[in-house]
Structure formats: C-alpha cells, structure tokens
Image (cartoon, rainbow, N blue to C red):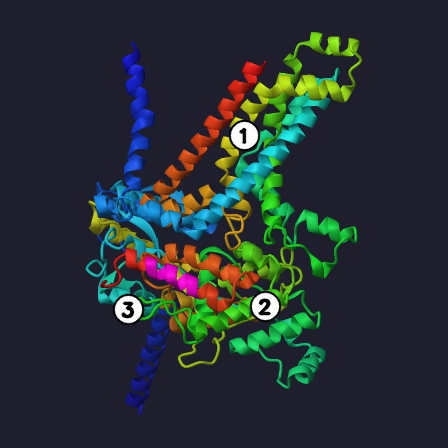
Amino acid sequence: MRKLTLILLITSLLAVLSFGALVSAQEGEPQYAGLDKDLAGITIKMLTIGGGQYEAMYQSLPIFEEATGATVEIVTLLDGFEIDKKLVQDYATGAVDYDVAWNHTSFMSRYVGFVEPLNNYFSAEELAAFSPSIVEAATIDGNLQLIPRHADISALHYRTDLYNDADIQAKYKEATGADLAVPTTLEEVDMQARFFHDNGYTKYGYSIVGKEEAVTGRFYEFLFGSGGNYFDENWEPIFNNEIGVSVAELLRGWYADGIIAEDTPNLVWDGDAANFCNGDVALKLEWYGWYSYFQTPDSCPNVAGNFGLARGFSGFQNEGARPTGWAGAHAFSITSASQNKEAAAQLIKFLTSERIGYEEAQLGFLPVRDDVWNRIISDASASGVPLDQERLEVARVQITEDFKTPPLIAEWIPFSNLFYPHLQAIMLGDVTAQEGLDAAAAEARQLLADAGYYDE
Amino acid sequence: MLLPSFVFIIIVTGFPLLYSLYVSFTPYELLKPNSLIFELPKALNNYTRLLNDPVFWKSLGNTIIFLTVTVNLEYFLALGLSQLLAQVTRGQAIMRTMLMIPMMFAPILVGFQFRWFFNSNLGLVNNALVSLGIIGEQTRIAWLVDEPLGMICIIIATIWMNLPVMTIILLAGTLSLPQETYEAADVDGASAWQKFRFITLPLLAPFTYIALTIRSLDVARAFDIVRIMTDGGPARRTELIWTYAGRLAIEDTKFGLGSAMSWITVIISVGFTVYLFRQLVKSRIVE
C-alpha cells in the first residue's frame, strides 16, 4: 500500500512538473531567431520601409548586432510607394548596394530576378512558422520571393448601433422581407447599403476608394468574390465578361444613387476611412490597420465602440463565388547583388522572428506567424474589450483562408493605371459598363502583348 | 576660352537631351534593361502609338485649355492688380511683400491646401455653402470630380499661387514707363481709360510678352498641383500632358514611350515660345 501510494505520489509530481513545463513553454518569452551564427566583421546594408510604427522594429537591431558581431546599416527609410520607385530604379540601373530590401506581395512581381530565391536559405521548419497562404502567394515559379513581416487584409466593418436597433430591424424586415443581419453576400450588402441610405440612417450606405491601385484592388475583390477574375490562365483579359459588367454596374448604380460619396472617384484610403470615422457610412470593407483609429473616441466619436467586424462577404452568387480577401504582406528579400547573402538571411530570420513579430503585433500589425497569433489572441482576451479578441480571430481566419494577392505579374501597376480611369468613367456615367470594360480589356491586352505574354 | 564652356554645356544639357531622344526611339522599359535596343523598323513605334492614343490627345487638349484659361485669367488679374498697386503711394513695399506670400509655398503644399478646400464632404468651400444655405447637406458639390469644375479648381489653385509673378513683372513695367507721355496726354485732355488703352498697354507690351512666355512655359509644365489635387482624374478629366508622361515613364516604367511624349511636348513648347518671342520683337519694333 505504501509502495502504491509512493508510486501515485511520484506520478502526480511528474504530471504536475510536466504540465508546469508545458505552461512555461507556452507562456515563456517569445524568442528571437537568426542569432546563431558568427557574422563578425560583416556589414549588412538594408533598404526598408520607414514612417510611424514601421520603424519600431529597427530599435531591436542592436540585439542582432551584439549577438552576431555584424553591423547593420539602414541605407534609407522611405514609404511604400517611394521605396518601390527607388527599388525599380536601383534594380534597373544596377545601383543596388544593399543586401536586404523591403518587399511586398503586391509589388514583388516587379522585382523577380533582382532578388534572391529564398528557398535555400530557410529550412522547411522555419517556413512552417509562417501562414502557408502567404508563403504560397509569395512563391513564383517555385521560387520564394520574400519572407513576410506582417500582413493586412480587409474586414467588413459595420455599425452595430444600426444593426442592433430594434426599430431599424423592424423597418428593414418590412421593407425587404429579410432579417437585418451582417451581410455575407454582395447582394445583401447592396440591399442593406441602399436601405440605410434611402431611409436617412446614414449619409451614404457604403464607402469605397475610387482611384489608383486602391480601386483596382477593391474591384478585384468584388470580381473574384463573384467568381470572376481579371485574366484567364493564358493571361487573356476576362474582366469584361458578365461578372465584370455586373460588378461595374453595381458601382455605377451606387454612385448615381448616392450610396457612395459624391467624391468617391477622388478618394483613397484616408478619405475612405474618414467617411466611416465620421459615421457617414453603415458598412464597408476596411483594413485592420485603422482599428485603433476607429476605436478612439477623440478621433471617431461617432463610431468608437459602435462597430463590429466580420469576414469579407462573398461577391455575386455565381459559380466560384468566395469571400473577399484582397490582401498583402510587407516583407523582406535578399537582393541578388548582395555580397553577404547568408548574413542577410540571418538578419531576415531575426526581423521575422516570433519575438519581433509579437512586438509588431502589439503595435496593431496583423501577424504572419501562428505562434504570434496565439500570443496576441491570448493577450486580447484579457483586454476587457470583446472586439479586441474578435478582431484578431476574424483576421486570423481571413489571413489563413481568404488571403489573395493581385495577379502575380510585373505589369500589375501599369495594368492598374490603365484600368482605373475606365472604371471611373463607368462610375461617373461617361460610358456604359460594357464599353468601359471592353476598352480597358483592349488596352490590357496590348500591355501584356508588349510584355510578351502571348505567342503571336 | 569658349571651348570649356561649350563642352560643359554639351555634357550637362546636350547629352541628356540626345539620350532621351535616342530612348524615345526604343521600347525601353526601366525594369527590362535588354529592351534598350534601337531597331530601325520599330523606331517610330512610340510616336505612332502616342498619335493613335486617345488619352494623349485628351491630355494635350486639356493642357491647351488649362494653359489658355490660366495664363489669360492670370494676365488680366495681374494687369488689374499691378495698375492698382502702381497707384499706391504709401506702404507699397509692404503690399508687394504680402503679394509674394503665395509664391513662397511649395506647389505640393498648395495642392494639398486646395484639395482640402474643395473636398466635398469635409472641405471649406462646401461647408461654407451649406452653412449659408446655398446648397443642402445632400446636394454637396463634388468639386474635384465634376467636369469642368475639377479643372476650374486646379486653375484657381494655380492662379492663386502664381499671380504674384506676373503682377510683379507688370508692376515693374508700369513703374518704369515714362511719365512725360502721361503728362502730355493730360495736357491733351485724355481720360484715364484712354491713357490706359493707348499709352500703358502698348508700352507694357514687351513686359507682357515676357510675362506670358515665362508663365506659359511654367503652366505647361504643371505637375505637382494637379498630381495632388486630382492626379489627372477622375476618368482623365484633368489629365495633362506631364501627368500622363509621368505616369507612363515613372509609374509604368515605360521610359521609351514617356521620352517620346516628352519630345512631342518639347517641340510644341518650343514652337509656342518662338511665336511669343517673335511677338515680343514685333512689340519692341513698334516701340
């Protein structure tokens, strides 16, 4: 009996110790990576994005320098579009004198051939830490172009004070015969946006950006969400088919009927977000990055604490319809011209490690690593604001399941530049949807033909 | 001693010009170094493509309208202002300094400022109109979207910023005119309008042509303000020749096409400048 008691005691003790070890492993400090090689005497030059919270991670560079003996020199800090212009010029003129360069899933196709494929620098285990959808999206012809730093994707933002109002719910039921619930299809979004606007609950029903790559991307979301696409597998433009026309007609109708703002064709991200912040909009797709702005009463008193988040809705219910999810990820690459590629890879491992990712996530960026997701969702559950946690849970689902980059071609931005004026002309009523999209398709085909996409 | 200067000018000015002329005959794209190839049968491709490009013609037409309206309006306003300023006997230096203030702003800042003024939802202009009851909350004007309001807004911003230049030139001209002529006209009983019409205007002609030439070339190069206020849009409604060239060359990295467009524009500008200088010479001969 004493022997049995002793065995039980030892077993219990071992169980407690094992559980404790497990807990401490999960709750322990997030770890850095890339510190395991001696890089003494090597200077790693980096061209990267700057401004605001983007620069917080660079304050950790002394830790990398101290552990490896390397020196890290940040050549230039620029915003996303400016850095793209510099990279294009440097790559084209052979003026690259840096080892690590900023990259982005929306721009990476322009840099193919100028950055080093990363497959050989990162083990399968290291890559498994990142969201597979992003790694897959960042792979062109089997070559991994970048290692993601953080991501962004749009969620449906909707006004809970409107959706939870019993009177509005009753009136909606009376007007449409349907229950007022967070929409999951573009048809429902259309119906609800019109209802809120037509009945004067909000100044506009919906809000959308109206120019540059921003509107090309938003149209793309509605298009692929409805089962369509810009190009087929042979890179022939197909956006002027029935699906494309129906999406363009929707936007044209929204503009004509005042469902979206009268200056929509001139709106980019800040103006679009301001419409929601002002309380002028009932629902819209919006990037997660605006979350803290919308939640701050001093900035957005009309919506702070009065909005909810949901996964992107599906497009028109055609075959192949799926949730929206135009997404992108800021990232790092090694330049082909680098003389210190191994050291550059170590620096990227450090900058995309669990520890740095966690620190960035605490600033509001969406993580790209599972271990970081677990940590920040756990942190958010203790914040006292249910939406803090809900936001991250929705975002994680979206990043995992809905992440979709623009077409991976170097001509994406030139295509966008020729496409969006036609879309604007359609919205403004200068041309019909079919005329505008046909004209854009003809120009897009010429663009891709010039670039050698067709055997002609 | 002329040789070093000549060589310097050739290197600094001539080489980039000739190089861009060469590039304009190639399909060069910035990210495709191998595309910088001159092939005689394809040498004029960029030019023929542009001449068949409706956006090119639209942007050229917009530029001509923008240039004509802006420079003429600016001239008449500057002429009026300069005549008023010329009458001021006390505090003219302070007024001249105040007049110069808009010139001190970077065009990009002026663009941001006027973009905010004309923002349909938050802008100063619409809010003022709503407050005064001239328009309703639901009938706000989309200043930067509507045609031709978008172009008019850009013209207003451009004139606001550049009016001082023309005013100062015309004021300097007015102050340098010989007073004896006016005194003689007074003796002959000429009215103020007759003095302005038959003395001031003809004598100011050289200054007018210089001011018009400088401003025309400047306005034709308009980029920053347009880029910020409308970026040539929406739907190309305010696309000008340089915003389109910038989009082709910088954003789309099509340097060959962008260079061809720049050369067409330069040729038009040179022709226009030659015309204005001929008018200047004629006005001096009359004088």
- Name the chain letter of the residue that bears numbered label 2: A
- Which residue is more in the foreground, A306 or B168? B168
Secondary structure under the numbered disc 3 in the rendered image = loop
> In the rendered image, which quarter contains the N terminus of chain B?
top left
Q: Residue at x 40, y 73 (%)?
A: A228
Closer to the eye: label 3 or 1: 1
Labels 3 & 1 near each other (Cβ < 8 A): no
Q: Position of residue A193 (x, y in %)?
A: 61, 72
Three-letter amino acid code at the position of disc 2? Trp
Q: Is residue A441 magenta?
A: yes
The label shown at residue A234 is 3
Per the rendered image, the range of residues in magenta is A438-446
> Principal SS element in the magenta part?
helix
Label 2, label 1: how many angstroms apart (C-alpha)?
42 Å
Q: Position of residue A434 (x, y in %)?
A: 47, 68
Mark 2, residue position: A254
Secondary structure under the numbered disc 2 in the rendered image = helix
In the image, are marks 2 and 3 on the same chain?
yes
In the image, are marks 3 and 1 on the same chain?
no
Q: Is residue B184 magenta?
A: no
Three-letter amino acid code at the position of disc 1? Arg
Q: Residue at x 68, y 16 (%)?
A: B199
> Dot 1: few (<14), some (14–19), or many (≥20) neighbours within 10 Å?
many
Marks counted in the figure total 3
For residue B250, above or below residue B206: below
